Amino acid sequence: MDYKEKMLNATKYIGGTILAFGIITFLIGFFATDSSVLTPMGIGAVVGAVFVFLIGIFFVAAEEMLEKAYRGVEPYRTK
């Protein structure tokens, strides 16, 4: 398995786990209890999961662009 695939899989599973935890925490805090602590924790976990996923995608894309630059392949340029 290529390094990029491993990084994407790790990003996907970690981000998905944090996202599921955040959604469950938000729903429990918003509907099940009157606790004002669980709702913002859930929102923060969801935002954190999105951030982790986007940073992982950025790392993979940046690495691929660097590999193309080292091989001498011209990156796609727009006019």
Image (cartoon, rainbow, N blue to C red):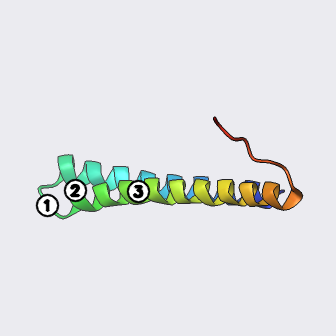
Q: Is residue 13 left or right of residue 32?
A: right
Element under label 1? loop
Observer-nearest of 22 and 31:
22
Type of residue at label 2?
Thr
Q: Name the residue: 88% across, 57% down.
A: 71
For disc 1, the marked residue is 36
For disc 3, the marked residue is 21
| Image quadrant in which the N terminus is located | bottom right
Residue 37, position as x, y percentages in the image:
18, 64
Asked if disc 2 and disc 1 are in contact, CB closer than 8 Å, the reply is yes
Type of residue at label 3?
Phe
| Of callouts 3 and 2, the N-terminal one | 3
Q: Which mark is residue 57?
A: none
Q: Is residue 79 left or right of residue 55?
A: right
Disc 2 and disc 1: Cα gap in Å?
6 Å
Q: Is residue 6 left or right of residue 78?
A: right
